[in-house]
Amino acid sequence: MLLYVWFVIAGAFAGVCAGLFGVGGGMVIVPVLVWIFTSYQFSPEVVTHLAVGTSLATIVVTSISSLTAHNKRGGVRWDIWRNMALGLVIGSLVGAGVADAIDGDSLQAIIGVGALLIALKMLFFSNKEQPKKPLTPPSVQFGAGTGIGLASSIFGIGGGSLTVPFLNWAGLSMKQSVGTAAACGLPIALAGAAGFAWFGKDMTNLPEGTIGFVHISGFFCISVASFITAKIGAKLAHQLPALMLKRAFGILLLFAGSQLLLSGLGVI
């Protein structure tokens, strides 16, 4: 029962972060799940894969909520989404296969590096509105979708930190970049979670209550809690300085990324 309580706490924390900082909760959920699964002495071989797969499953729910809100405000360019969607699915499935071939410690270190890079981006760089220019061709959008899907699936994230800069560079306004990136999170999460469920189906050292590398009760508890608390985070976001929020999240990711990297390398 206490495990479910930790799942709810993790989901609530991720939801607040998602609403507060304007990013998906994947980079928060993965480190927290690694800590929870390790504390409950799950097999070290499956801890990181289980955290990533479960994180991707929860992003299915949060991305639907996010894209619906952005679509109501005309923020989703569905023509661009269609050009990227197949690439996102292919990349996410390949990413799940790549992650399956990597041992748990190495995957943890890779995710730690990803978190540190995003932290540095949050702290020292910003997504600035690019000058209006013609859209990149569909082939470029498809290729970018494949790369974004692959990286996002390995890291267990919805890909917003990668998709927003690309879409803005590709010719969309910042508003449409954010909205379309939210919609792109759905095929990433669906394909990524399905891939992790499939590649983990023959693992013999998984705990009970899993489908491959997806922890079912963890998925439900985190999804419900994050869905509720994201509204609280969004409300707070309108009351606190944007720059302070951005730096706070960057510092949070620095700690999480450092812990994952050092743990994966066997330093701690």
Image (spheres, rainbow, N blue to C red):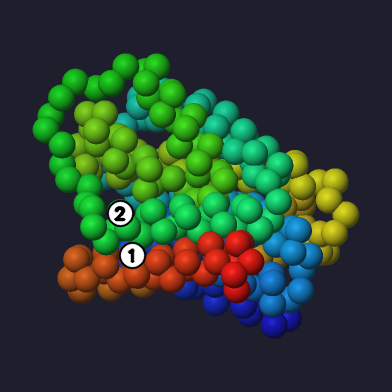
Q: Residue at x 69, y 70 (%)?
A: 37
Asked which secondary structure carries label 2, the reply is helix
Q: Is residue 180 left or right of residue 217?
A: left
Would you say the residues marked 2 and 1 are in contact, meaning their CB atoms lie under 8 Å apart?
yes
| Picture quarter with the N terminus | bottom right
Asked which secondary structure carries label 1, the reply is helix
Question: Which residue type carries mark 2?
Answer: Lys
Q: Residue furthest front?
A: 267
Can you give x and y, in whole percent of width and height, for residue 152 in the image? 50, 44
Q: Is residue 186 left or right of residue 244?
A: right
Residue designated by label 1: 250
Question: Which residue type carries mark 1?
Answer: Gly
In this rendered view, identify the residue nearer to me: 214 or 204.
204
Query: How would you rate the neighbour count of disc 2 (Cα within 10 Å): few for under 14, some for 14-19, many for 20 or more?
Result: some
Can you give x and y, in whole percent of width and height, for residue 51 in the image? 63, 59
Q: Residue at x 60, y 58 (%)?
A: 108
Q: Residue at x 27, y 61 (%)?
A: 123
Q: Residue furthest right?
A: 204
Whether 253 is drawn above or below 144: the answer is below
Query: How would you rate the neighbour count of disc 1 (Cα within 10 Å): few for under 14, some for 14-19, many for 20 or more?
Result: many
**Where is residue 166, by image quadrant?**
top left
Residue designated by label 2: 121
